[in-house]
Image: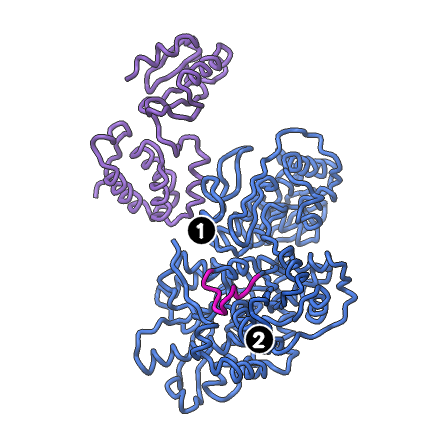
Chain colours: A blue, B purple
Amino acid sequence: MTTVYINKQPVEIKEGSTILEAAAKTGIKIPTLCHVENQIPKGACRVCMVDVEGAKSMVASCTTPCTEGMKITTNSRNVREARKFVVELLISEHCGECKTCVRNDDCELQSLARELGVFEVEYEGETLVSCIDDSTPALVRDSGKCIKCRRCMTVCNEIQVVGSLFAQGRGFESKIGPAFDQQLDGVVCVQCGQCAAICPVGAITEKEHIDYIWEAIEDTAKFVVVQTAPAIRAALGECFDYEPGTLVTGKMVSALCLLGFDRVFDTNFAADLTIMEEGTELLVRLKEALVDKKQVALPQFTSCSPGWIKYAEYFYPEYLDNISTCKSPQQMFGAVAKTYYAKKAGVDPKDIVVVSVMPCTAKKFEAQRPEMNDSGFQDVDYVLTTRELGRMIKQSGIDFKELNDDVMDSPMGKSSGAADIFANTGGVMEAAVRTAYEIVTGKELPMENLHIKPVAGLEGVKKASLKIEGCKPEWGFLEGVELKVGVAHGLGNAKKIIEAMRAGEEFHFIEIMTCPGGCIGGGGQPRFTTDEVRMKRIEAIYKEDEGKQLRKSHQNPEIAQIYEEFLEKPISHLSHKLLHTNYIERN
Amino acid sequence: MTEPKAKPASCTCSEVSEEELYERLKIIVQSQRTIPGALIPVLQTAQDLFGYLPEKALRMISKELKLPYSEVAGVVGFYSYFSTTPKGKHTIRVCMGTACYVRGGQDVLKALIKELDISVGGTTNDRKFSLEVGRCFGACGLAPVVMVDDETFQRVKPSKVSEILNQFE
């Protein structure tokens, strides 16, 4: 342990900790625009300056390690003036109008300027040039607003290991972006939007679909249905100043009704459907491997997360056969909304507009994949992020906090607790195992509260094994089999688990979610997401799960109904056509 | 295995096919794959081989070193030493150090820009000359100084630049 003195107060801190960490421990806030939690500090923004007694000049607290007896001042006129100066310089070259910026009121540069009392910028010099890159379906980049803090680089390269964004050029001319001024569609990008979620300003944002949706809602010829992903209900409240982890399911449904959607359905219903298909697919693969002795691609990977799919298509094409052929719940929903539901409701599918609310930007990309039109139309028309839904609700003048709770419409609005936990890392695995175990043994998963503890939480790579005992006769070949499962979240961790598998580690089933923490930490979620916020959202999701009578996907009566009335059985001919897909190798 | 020796750019055009150059580059990159910090030496080698850094070579380096293409581009763009445009047969460097600057280096540069009809960093259409500026060649007593390849020209006047250029084939 090392003792340092911050503003004369002694602080004991682990050796090697930075001044920024030491200050955080004592509850002293040092502002920073470039720091990324748990990552090597870059010292790019120079906002976190502090005075250290005996040092030649002020130091950046994020990159300076504490040494024994160090005397640090975080709050003096000198320090405040220095920070203000840095922010003034950043603003002096910033090309963007707060008034019309989509990130107005959600901008760290703006709020820091306000906190530091920057009301005038004396430096009149050259400003950045605004080049808009809207080449991809999900993200928009504006070079004029970029403050070159490099947070996007950190998430893209170190957390997601995708490598789309780097510093290009040097000095005033430098830009953070793809190689040689290319647009994002010219390089490898999985559209996860973690860059948009961490950008302190409005330089990277989601491509907005709000106006298309208003237009569809106002068009009386259109029947507009909306689905909401499992992770929305634990985060939407943050757009209205609720504490992270506040469940707002009922208010969310009320708000969607008031916005004018004709039906409010639940992606969770489709998540239950996914479990039926994906769990069955896993059992089929195991049977083919163990009984028929066929060459089958195992382990099976989950397929719910479109960023992961695109990542595998680029970086691990040799494992595309291992990825479950199941579409994601979003896409399953779209396909059945324009077939099963259209028929049931007596609406021409060409008039149905399917809108999704997703915690994710990659879902915008997924919805427009050319193969996602098995209903005969584009299965999902528009995708809103959680942030966009928050803005739509504000635009319509709805007082969210005053809303009553409402419930989803039928027959695609009911869901089990297993569907809820799709929102967080480990959840899809747990949901699948809850159902698969019961199919095979006829008994409930023998775990406390149906949770597979080793795959829960924020550890990057998690593993568990489960001995299958007491199989029904038709599943006798699984008797005594040790089912080995793995879970990874964040693509850097996905890479780790795949490399472990390549090196010989055995798995039967691996869940991969693109974003840290899973969908609750998605690129479309309210800002600003830290591990603390992730954990609060996860707790809320488990609470939603545990509060339900229905805890397992196969118990959902609306799932039984859709198979009875329409799909027949999991992996039937029709479900194969509507609910399954294939992947392409990308170069 | 001995490392294939990189030949200077001027030798490559007639003797070695482009295909062979890429083959050589591939062998070099593969031999450096496991060395941390291999990118810059590999880029230097590639520039020696081709005379500049063609996109195809950068794509190969990115793939073989398993580094994102955007990272490779970032490094290339950071160092003025690296060039992604083909260089001319002769490189003209005009000194813009303090002494040369005050004694008219800027006017010499302007004259060269006009005469060659290219900007700084550019190459003439016939790939004969590339134009660069330098920061002090250590010959301040001879200011303003221009270097063409390894040859130094002293006390250059704007009116004399065409005379200098004419000396080069």
Residue marked by disc 1: A188
- Would you identify the image quadrant in which residue B28 lies? top left
Q: Residue at x 53, y 54 (%)?
A: A137
Please state which of residues B140 and A390 is positioned toward the viewer in this rendering.
A390
The picture places residue A417, in percent across and down from the top left corner, at 60, 77
For label 2, the SS is helix
Q: Is residue A323 above or below residue B20?
A: below
Quarter containing the C terminus of chain B: top left
- Discs 2 and 1 share one subunit: yes
The picture places residue A492, in percent across and down from the top left corner, at 47, 57
**Amino acid at circle 2:** Tyr
Query: Can you see residue A452?
Result: no
* Residue B29 located left or right of residue A115: left
Residue marked by disc 2: A341
Image: magenta residue range: A370-381
Q: Residue at x 75, y 63 (%)?
A: A400
Q: Is residue A363 above or below residue B77?
A: below
Does the magenta-highlighted stretch encompass residue A322? no
Query: Can you see residue A171?
Result: yes
Please state which of residues B102 and A555 is positioned toward the viewer in this rendering.
A555
Q: Earlier in the sequence, mark 2 or mark 1?
A: 1
